[in-house]
């Protein structure tokens, strides 16, 4: 079933402040660049209880986020602007209907941290613990679960995969082997995901162009098994099959021909075959 999403560019800039919502839903997401925080003084609807995510980059290979809740984001963000250096934009979620309560946004914070830690696609080192869920009435908890599903949809809509879990389809598994590598993964709309437990080559060839980045990724995403092999400790997604194959093999590789399924069909022959 299709969905209709309305996006409004508040200042007319596609990279500026905007909000988005799904038709017939109460969840409204504001995307606010750090440089545009002055808008908080202009919009009273942003001075109500809200659940929020700060997004940014760090020296690590994963993007970084901080998840929180507040009764007034305008006041709360002043501390974040002074004490947290990593973030470049904030995602702020409010209700288009009646304002949410403190307990509502605490429940959303609990669910968001819990799910984001499970997907492990962002660094959450400033959310050291998952807060306990507040004691909401059963009907309200159901309301907030529906609201959180819309939160996940809207974050994905703008290209933020903090809550995304890609489902494995066994019939689409592909494998690459060689140079101490024995990896498996699958292709999907966001790129190519190498699966946890894949064996990764420890060394790189002199011609590989991103040795330093790969070295950082090995430290963050792999561990040494009992037999001395280097294995992935979590699923890892790359934008392209070739980058994924290069990471696994430690050398330049064409992922469209290197990744092969159990019948030795290349990724190219499965996904790029001519239309009949």
Image (cartoon, helix red, strand yellow):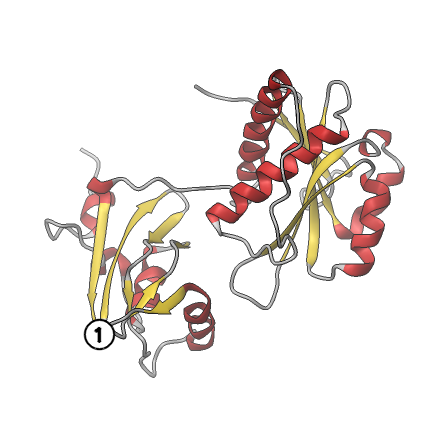
Q: Residue at x 70, y 44 (%)?
A: 68
* Extreme residue in the bottom direction: 206
Q: Residues within 10 Å of mark 1 (few under 14, many from 20)?
A: some
Classify the position of the N terminus by image quarter: top left
Total labels: the figure holds: 1
Q: Is residue 157 above or below residue 215?
A: above
* Extreme residue in the right direction: 41
Side of 67 relative to 264 (left or right): right
Q: Nearer the viewer, residue 59 or 228?
A: 228
Which percent across, then down, holds residue 29? Answer: 67, 33
Residue 22, quarter of picture: top right
- Whether residue 258 is visible here, answered yes or no, is yes
- Whether residue 159 is visible here, answered yes or no, is no
Q: Residue at x 32, y 53 (%)?
A: 195
Q: Is residue 243 above or below residue 192?
A: below
Which percent across, then down, holds residue 50? Answer: 74, 34
Q: Which residue is mark 1?
A: 179
Side of 133 relative to 211 (left or right): right
Q: Secondary structure at mark 1?
A: loop
Which percent across, then down, holds residue 168? Answer: 30, 42
* Extreme residue in the left direction: 263
Q: Nearer the viewer, residue 142 or 133?
A: 133
Which percent across, then down, holds residue 131? Answer: 64, 43
Q: Nearer the viewer, residue 269 or 35?
A: 35
Classify the position of the C terminus by image quarter: top left
Side of 269 relative to 55 (left or right): left
């Amino acid at each position: 079933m299709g969905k209709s999403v309305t996006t409004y560019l508040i200042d007319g800039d596609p990279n500026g402040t905007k909000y988005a919502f799904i038709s017939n839903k109460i969840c409204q997401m504001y995307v606010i660049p750090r440089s545009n925080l002055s808008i908080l003084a202009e919009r009273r609807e942003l001075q109500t209880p809200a659940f929020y995510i700060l997004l940014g980059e760090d020296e690590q290979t994963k993007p970084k986020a901080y998840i929180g809740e507040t009764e007034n984001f305008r006041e709360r963000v002043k501390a974040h602007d002074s004490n947290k250096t990593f973030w470049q934009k904030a995602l702020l979620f409010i209700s288009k209907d009646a304002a949410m309560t403190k307990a509502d946004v605490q429940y959303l914070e609990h669910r968001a941290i819990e799910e984001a830690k499970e997907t492990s696609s962002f660094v959450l080192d400033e959310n050291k613990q998952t807060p306990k869920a507040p004691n909401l009435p059963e009907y309200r908890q159901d309301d907030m679960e529906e609201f959180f599903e819309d939160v996940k949809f809207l974050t994905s809509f703008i290209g933020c995969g903090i809550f995304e879990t890609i489902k494995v389809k066994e019939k689409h598994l592909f494998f690459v082997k060689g140079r101490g590598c024995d990896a498996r993964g699958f292709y999907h709309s966001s790129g190519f995901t190498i699966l946890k437990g894949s064996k990764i080559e420890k060394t790189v060839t002199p011609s590989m162009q991103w040795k330093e980045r790969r070295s950082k990724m090995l430290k963050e995403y792999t561990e040494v098994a009992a037999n001395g092999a280097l294995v992935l400790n979590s699923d890892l997604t790359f934008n392209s099959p070739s980058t994924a194959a290069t990471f696994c093999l430690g050398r330049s590789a064409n992922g469209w021909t290197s990744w092969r399924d159990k019948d030795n069909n290349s990724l190219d022959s499965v996904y790029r075959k001519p239309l009949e």
